[in-house]
Image: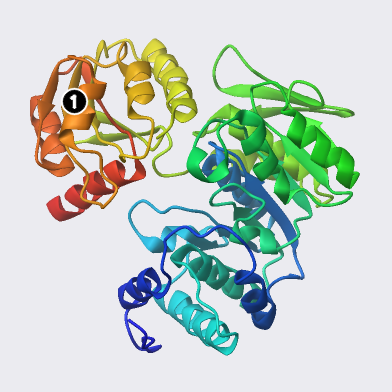
Amino acid sequence: MNTAPLASDSLNTWLDYWGHVHVSGIDLGLERVIPVAELLGVTRPQAKVFTVAGTNGKGSTTAALAAVLNAQGYSVGLYQSPHIYRFNERVKLRGREVEDQALIDAFVAVDQARRACGLSLSFFEATTLAAFVIFKQQQCDVWVLEVGLGGRLDVVNVIDPDVAVITNIGLDHTDWLGDSIEKIAFEKAGIIRPEIPVVFGGQQDLPQAIQDKADECGAQLHAVNRDYFYQPAEDGQSWMFASAGTTLKLPAGSLALENISTAVAAVLLSGLTVSQQAVAQGIQNAKLQGRFEVRNIAGKTVIFDAGHNPHGVDFLLKQLRKFLEYNKQYTEVVSVFSMLADKDINSVASLLKDAVLMWKIAPLNVPRAASITALDAALQGQQAQHFSSVKSAFKSALNETKNNQLILVCGSFHTLEAVWEYLEECQ
């Protein structure tokens, strides 16, 4: 499709258009993006910019950052990806998803700019630039930006952040980013700029590539368990944050403490005025779909988690064990499970096998879907029921689980999306 839609066309028409403009869905590099971004005037925002990279935890960290700053009264533009159900989830202003027309108007501007430059943009590049256009038009005080893939060559990196955050480093997207922790850390460290605060929140040894990049830039690197610390209280209702000259007692939120503490560290280093009350309120307000999200559906307890690599699933398991410890009525887990073929299905299944009693597996309805054969092989003979779709697998789980069982929907954002579509249809 070469003819651009009109400003009066639907959001879905525009999203379909961006899906067909460029030859490939992923095309790392900033050569094509920078001229378009400069023509749009979005490369030097009159705002405080937080850029968040990492293998897992970016969504929770950016959600917590935005919630704290919104609680303080700042006008915050939050950009995240991917979405789970509605594309609008990716772009939020002051805590609310933007309306379709705001996105469409921004898409018109992006398309005009890329045509003026004689350049093609991928879906991710075009939609990210549209978010920047909206934040600029709305004169947001703060931009909180989640990196899509890597960091150094990701479209988000056309903007120089005032604070760089790296949540953790794990093996994912190895075809694009490299096959070792240090190679991937080098890509993530590409968001670091001279003399800015940098937060590393990973529960692992600090990768040398991140330290080297910070040293090269003269950036002030603050690492968890070295420069700042957090400790949950025994009651599970509060926790302590401590850094040089700062000790805070804060309420527990619904997001993982590892990521909340990373966000708090970034806020405190930003130079923005933020009260302890706003930090506490923001933590309690911060929510994110699909990150160990516990819901009651038709009288059954369902946990949604979008973890799709070994590092993310290991983190899911830690939260699951804690949940089961506090909710002893649940003694068995039934999983509605599917993954993309290019993910490490064997490792993910191996991690989950001791926690899951029964698997309900189905192929995803996307081009990169793993086959039912590949999913079954990864389970290595564990008890599994096969379904033609994730929706039918979830329907079976709802109908058949007993009072002592909870349902875990996991493996991919697409798995969660399919269940949400089913729930929407049932309303």
Residue 266 at what x, y percent from top left?
74, 42
Looking at the picture, does residue 339 appear above or below residue 320?
below
Of the pair 393 and 140, the residue shown nearer to us:
393
Q: Amino acid at mark 1?
A: Asp
Query: Left or right: where does residue 353 sit relative to residue 280?
Result: left
Residue name at image x 62 percent, y 32 percent: 168
Residue name at image x 64 percent, y 68 percent: 31
Query: Left or right: where does residue 88 sit relative to residue 208?
Result: left
Residue name at image x 32 percent, y 72 percent: 16
Query: Left or right: where does residue 271 sit relative to residue 83?
Result: right
Residue 294 at what x, y percent from top left?
35, 32
Instruction: Say which element carries label 1.
Output: helix
Question: In the rendered image, which residue does mark 1 sit on?
Answer: 376
Q: Quadrant of residue 8?
A: bottom left
Looking at the picture, does residue 241 appear above or below residue 84?
above
Specify few, some or many for label 1: CA neighbours under 10 Å numbering under 14, 14-19, or 20 or more: many
Residue 356 at what x, y percent from top left?
26, 17
Q: Quadrant of residue 229?
A: top right
Looking at the picture, does residue 200 appear above or below residue 205?
below
Q: Quadrant of residue 301?
A: top left
Query: Left or right: where does residue 184 sit relative to residue 125?
Result: right
